[in-house]
Amino acid sequence: MLLNLLLATAAAIGGSSNVAGQTAVHRIFSVTPRMTSLYDQNGNDIGNYVFSEHFFDSSLDAYDSQAADDFVVPSGHLWNVKEIDVTGTYFFGSGQVTSVHVFFYNDQAGLPGSPNADCNNLGPSEANGSGSFVVKIPKTCKVKLRHGTHWLSVQVNDSASRQWGWEGTSTQNGNPFAWRNPGDALGTGCTTWRTDCFATEFDLMFALKGKDVIR
């Protein structure tokens, strides 16, 4: 267990997707009928990732961390998000994450602010245990986003025997990713949302799909 946590600590700070022979796989998921591609920065992998995981073991709460990245809904549009495609990698362990926690936040001075939607315990559909997956948003958790800047956060729920990183992209849109580790067990000092936690700043790989209502 201690070895796992040491690996997590090292990987969260300037992690490379080639740690322990793991390489991120960008899976292309088709658009479901009656849905459209709303936003896509799920390409141009730079080979770095950031830790974003909640451990089931409450004794490891101080290691829980969360990453988020921003995007803009154009003026005159209302997005009803139904699916999220995420590119990530395992830097320890393998298999498929147990579940995923998805958050949408409104922007507050260039950081995640008030919550817009909170969808937990979602079952990901994963491609070959690669760490890249698609998450369907259920009808019980509506995600409707109006014009302006919003933040998406994807946090996996799992045991310490499998540790996941959200892959970075060289495509820069808006602010670099934000990150926090409230318990500060990873020693960055980023107990609240910040965009300058690591030496390398980048955006995160994801795509949003759903319905676009032009108002």
Image (cartoon, rainbow, N blue to C red):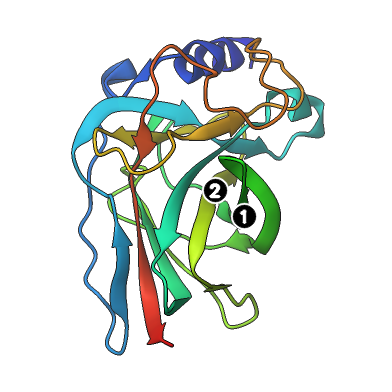
Q: Are marks 2 and 1 in contact (CB under 8 Å)?
A: yes
Residue at point 39%, 82% (across, down):
211
Counting residues from the start of the chain, the first of labels 2 and 1 encountered is 1
Q: Give x and y (percent) for residue 54.
A: 65, 38
Question: In the rendering, which numbered label is found on residue 155?
Answer: none
Residue 187 in sight: yes
Quarter of the picture containing the C terminus is bottom left
Disc 1 crowd rating (10 Å Cα; few below 14, some 14-19, many 20+) is many
Q: Is residue 73 left or right of residue 68?
A: left
> Residue at image x 28%, y 50%?
41
Q: Nearer the viewer, residue 121 or 106?
A: 106
Q: Is residue 65 above or below residue 70?
A: above
Q: Is residue 4 left or right of residue 85?
A: right
Instruction: Judge from the rendering whether residue 188 lies leftward or rightward of residue 202; answer left or right.
Output: right
The residue indicated by pointer 1 is: 105
Quarter of the image that includes the N terminus:
top right
What's the amino acid at mark 1? Tyr
Relative vertical location of residue 71 with respect to residue 161 in this rendering, above or below:
below
**Residue 43 to residue 82: above or below:** above
Which element type, helix, strand or loop, lies under badge 2?
Answer: strand
Q: Nearer the viewer, residue 178 or 168?
A: 178
- Can residue 92 be seen at all in this image of the molecule? no
Residue 70: x and y in percent read 46, 48
Of the pair 94 and 188, the residue shown nearer to us: 188
Mark 2 is surrounded, within 10 Å at the Cα level, by few (under 14), some (14 to 19) or many (20 or more) other residues, namely many
* Amino acid at the residue labelled 2: Ser
| Residue under the image location 21 percent in, 71 percent down | 30
Picture disc at residue 153: 2
